[in-house]
Amino acid sequence: MHNIIGETLMKNPITFPKAEGIYTRQAHCDIPDGLYEREHGRNGFFGPASHILHTHKPTGWTKWEGPLELTLLDLNRLNDSAPCPWKAQRFMHNGQTQVCFWKFDVSMPDLARNGDGDMILFFHKGEGEFFCDYGHMSYREGDYINIPRGTTWRLETSVRNEVLTIEATEDLFQLPERGITGRHAQFDLAVLDTPKIDEAYKAQYGEHETRVRAKRRQQVTTVTFPYNFLDTAGWHGDCVPVKLNWRDIRELLSDRYHLPPTVHATFLSNTIIVCTFAPRPIESDPGALKVPFYHNNDEFDESIFYHQGNFFSRDNIKPGMFTLHPSGFHHGPHPKAFAAAAANNKGERKYTDEVAVMIDSRYPLELDVLPNGVKVPGYLDSWKE
């Protein structure tokens, strides 16, 4: 048994960090009154970190000048697009990802295939049917569908859909390693749904002409067939689209310590971390921090799509909004959220009430040119008391 454990578990040597002046024995806990903790961390919360106690809030700026800033977008203000994923409004990108908000209300007339990388669909609103090379699945609000690169697919719907799409350009999405929590932590692999060759799938067989809109190098080529390309009679293997609803995620918890966002990781590429924040119990220990800590997470740009609920670390944020915080700039809870958490030490509020999708990137993210009104003015000032 000793040899098996030694071979399968990652181990870290015991290190003794340096300390100076006033400090706490445990990060994010028992912070002295009048002081504010900031984490200076590396490698997306996975690397070395120090915790600095400030006499002022690290977000207490009075002026911000320069090309980079903390940004709030209201994606609700984007226009609808055609029922084709390659026509969706892209609003953020880099060489490793394309992030779009796709709004439509009719079925896709053509099939889609992404040759640039794996693709995640997160359904902010809507419901319908997903057909692909592997069969059929129904989808609803709150579902993720992870589509492997090269899969041919389409959506059928009769209602309005709003979909966050995340591409792993020249890469693939996988599940995070759960380590000592075990492979069933957060969600058992049994909750992942896969397409079925059911009666709904067989009913769409036919000799009618179909077009496949295939994207490669961010260019779209249309390939036409005299029959329905989705004519699969059967398959076996483990390269297949999977569906996961946020309601099936069982959040990792600690009542005495505020866990970092990376414990909520849902999908990973080599450079992108997709996390899901779902309702969970609020830390109950009086000394434990109850909102995200102030930090400058160097090496990763951080962005969050707000799906539903009351976002406990932000003020004046509503569903359908999106924030981008570049690496290297301090950020953390808004003043009202910070004050509300401090007032909750008696435990009147037991649970968070939010669902959000975090997209962290190892490489800098660029915002696209967007229509007037999408970028919300004054976001930088929202940290002022």
Image (tube, rainbow, N blue to C red):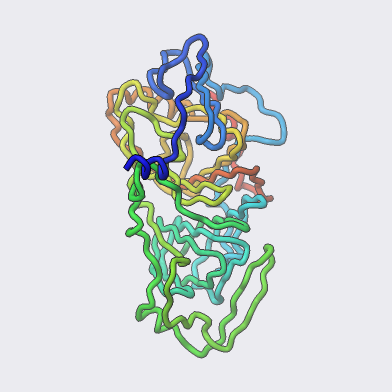
Drawn side of residue 345 relative to residue 35, left or right: left
Above-or-below relation of 225 to 243: below
Q: 240 or 200: nearer the eye? A: 240
Task: Please name the residue shown 52% across and 27% down the image.
Answer: 49
Quadrant location of the N terminus?
top left
Task: Please name the residue shown 47% across and 51% down the image.
Answer: 267
Task: Please name the residue shown 40% across and 70% down the image.
Answer: 195
The part of the image, by quadrant, that contains residue 290 is top left
Residue lying furthest right in this view?
66
Q: 167 or 175: nearer the eye? A: 175
User: Residue 341: image x %, image y %?
Assistant: 38, 27
Number of marks present in the image shown: 0
Residue 274 makes an appearance in the image: yes
User: Residue 238: image x %, image y %?
Assistant: 44, 66
User: Residue 57: image x %, image y %?
Assistant: 52, 20
User: Residue 359: image x %, image y %?
Assistant: 53, 46
Above-or-below relation of 55 to 191: above
Task: Please name the residue shown 35% across and 51% down the image.
Answer: 187
Q: 55 or 311: nearer the eye? A: 55
Residue 277 makes an appearance in the image: no
The part of the image, by quadrant, that contains residue 375 is top right
